[in-house]
Image (tube, grey):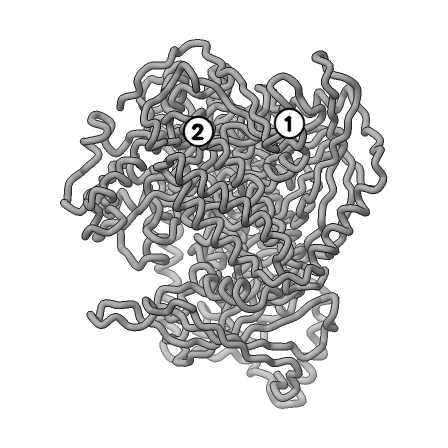
Amino acid sequence: MKDKKIAKEKTAKYKKPNNADAVKNKSGKGVKSKIIKFRIQRFDAAKDKKDDTPRYDTFELEVKEGTTLLDCLDMIKWKHDGSLTYRRNCKNSICGSCGMKVNKRTKLACETQVHKVTETFCSDEILIEPMGNMKPVKDLVVDMGNFWDALHAVKPWIIYDGSFPEKEFIMKKEEAKKLDAVASCIMCGVCYSDCNSLEVEKRFLGPAALARALRYADDSRDTRKKERLRALNKPSNHGIWDCTHCFACVQVCPMKVAPLEQILKIRKYAQQSGMIFNPGARHHKAFSDGVKHAGWINEVTLPMKSVGLNIVGFFQLAPVGMRMYFKGKMPDIWHKPIVGAEEIKKIYLELEKKEMSNKSDIKEPELFEHRNPNKE
Amino acid sequence: MIQHDIIIIGGGLAGMRAAIEAKGKVAIISKVHPLRSHSCAAEGGIAASLGNSMPDSWEEHMYDTVKGSDFLADQDAVEYMVKEASGEIFALEHMGVIFSRTDDGRIAQRNFGGYSKPRVCYATDKTGHALLHELYSQILKKGVKVYEEWYVLKLIIEPKGINEDGSKQQVCKGVIALDIKTGNIELIQAKAVLLATGAYGKCYKTTSNDYASTGDGLALVLRESLPLQDMEFVQIHPTGLYKLGLLVTEAVRGEGGYLINGKGERFMKRYAETKMELAPRDITSRAIESEILAGRGIGGKDFVYLDLRHLGKEKIMEKLPFVHEMCAKQMHIDVVTQPIPVRPTVHYSMGGIPVTKECEVLKDSKNRVLGLYAAGECACISVHGANRLGANSLLECVVFGKRAGRMMNLFCANNEIEEIYNQKLLEEEKKKIEELLNTDGKIRMIEVRDELQNTMEKYCWLLRDDRKLKFALETVRDLQKAYSQINIDDKSKTFNTNLIEVLELGSLLKFSEIIVLSALNRKESRGSHTRADFPKRDDIKYLKHFMVSKNEDEATGIKIDERPVVITKHQPEERKY
């Protein structure tokens, strides 16, 4: 960022009028307080052009230990600059309104302890920016349209073909518990904001929507599991195979939904249901086969196996291959086993044996055909 | 010109339930995204006499609710609600709500304050969240139009014909709303309008309510000179997180948590011998306040402990994970090893917009406003009377949300969109906002709001008396005058939250006056309304609802109407737990 060009940087000081209790208590038990600078990105879609250098305003506040970022923003808005704009509602990390980037990492403002941030970053200045992967509207408010569209795309509702029971569905405790993690998603968009795949592929459904998709695919009341898996598996839908395993969503999720794990679960279900004829699944298999065979991936066959029997795909690969060849980056055609490859093979065999013996336990074709054999 | 058959103001539980039921061109207008609605913060559960862990019946549910309400609830409405409860729970379950389960796979039920049986269905301690997200899914499925982040400025109500008693009949023809994102102000016509705007706890400082709980629906109604009913009954929840006011769910006590005072006693034995911690909320809150006033708070301070250490880690993590998380995040307390400091916090409003059992808004004790409906917390259908039992609010939202939806369908089938006579309404509203934005005021919004919240908290809290309330009334009226002098920093059109906050403050000021007036009017102690100068319940004079409205025709500017309490099955008796 071109800091020098910031035209309207202003520094404002606000100190709590009655800071008697903010000062350290003599008994030593008192609450710590210190001056913290908040550098906040400002923007107004109606006034600023998109590619303008972002404007930043800096505010200084005396902040007591235990104060959340949201409290600080409120203090700035209410007592100093009413035009500072952000979303917030419940103050209790359940409504999911107040996602924003704090020192480049997206968090919910209502549960972010300011003192902790300064300790982690060893700096009393905190940079606040709007969430990423979404268009800014004003200051810290972004347009979440794409995020909601992605949610809508995965059909986030139970589809049950058949007549409903008179009372509730019988659902085992474990079946309900299995959904705990995915069901606790609050749709705050924090994972969407920090998703690295989304940065390069805007059509990717994103972590939250996919985790939500699993919540329905895994619900014992839904009768369209296969259909859901098929849709999520289809490359043109930009579902499960657009994820690159960076774990950012797992790290930032405030509700411990672990979206990546859910995406991996969907991949597993899809492959178990025989949906293996697509680049993603083939890539998985080629990767695994290479390691099994020689202890490391086979860079020659990997792209070809991923593409599969697809003439267009081969032609798309060709220029990359040519360039690699001329730059001397072409891997050895002969896939040489590494030291210890035999050990790795043994691990594979062991795992495969386990898989086979587990197969009888896996209730995965839990596609609920038993409930409604005529459909699906 | 935008036209719809049905407009629903508010995208919370009641609003969305109504939208699912409604037919034709339906739209939800909400000042926040529906998933951000405050319904998501409901923790404990939703009551229904399923009898999944113990035989139960709607009759018992009804008696508990009526007794809990200190006999002010309208029993016909209560009967309707508790009878519908089980079916509604099953419908929600079929929609996909993930309820916690019993060992045999049925919906699990837990104990709650004021109930004689474990009757509360729950989804761990995030029941509201579970319900709200599933209802939103249904909205998506149905393809209901949602005006996200639109703020309703005015209801369009115009006269039409004459009522039976000779008074003028009124009909609601639509709303004027502000698109927060762009700043545009639009007129939206409709055959029927539903108010489902939720709570108004933000007129108090210590509240478990969110930022958006500013009772805008009530202010809309007041502006049209329509009344509000039973506004003195503000529920103060016993266990708010100390100082922050965030809610610690009643489920903590339902699962067996203790309330402990500074002396280390379970003090509830003095106030509710048999029910102990599971007494209704008004009694428990008063008990905590009495302990604190008597100097028996923890270390003599103004809080007590809510102790769940004896439940053990496993039970806490299974049944109360959100409480565990919240205490860790907000207070750095591990509830497995440490007790939670709690103080009563404003939580719910029993009063609101008076409606008939069919959810139609009342103009006075007899006449309705055609095409205007209300449901959920903003409405006073009076199923909660003077004190609500926990878990009955979510039930009210879904049962009467659905009913409102059906009633509106009936109304729409027989009515057309009405022509609006006053063509200047939209222009006037635009001018008003323009003026508000360009006020060259000197006062900051927060000064007025803080003053209001502190006044309400100090003088219109649990223990009220004539002197305190009169002082509160005076202050609120002074603040209303100061309102016109408020400065708005943000002059822009896009996403002007500064403007919205000021508009919300306007709402708070409007109905706070009515809360105080209603409290002054009720010279008895009943349910959540306790008058130090009239400590007894007075069934002869005050076993009725009062409807208060601003009316310029009256000398005092205030009109107070009465409405009888419907008593069918249970005669008032002394309330003991």
Chain for disc number 2: B
Left/right placement of residue B31 relative to residue B91 reads right
Disc 2 marks which amino acid?
A: Asn
Q: Where is residue B248 in the image (x, y as percent from the top left)?
A: 35, 45
Secondary element type, mark 2: helix
Chain for disc number 1: B
Residue pictured at 70% horizontal, 41% vertical: B154
In this rendering, the answer to whether A59 lies above or below B433 is: below
Query: Is tag 1's residue or tag 2's residue first in the polypeptide sequence?
Result: 2
Whether the residues at callouts 1 and 2 have beta carbons within 8 Å, the answer is no
Q: Position of residue A243 (x, y in %)?
A: 56, 63
Residue pictured at 46% horizontal, 44% vertical: B41
Residue pictured at 65% horizontal, 64% vertical: B490
Secondary element type, mark 1: helix
State the image quarter where residue A119 is shown: bottom left
- Tell me the residue that label 1 is attached to: B405
Left/right placement of residue A195 relative to residue B56 reads right
B339 or A219: nearer the eye? B339
State whether residue B324 appears in this view. Answer: yes
- Tell me the residue that label 2 is attached to: B392
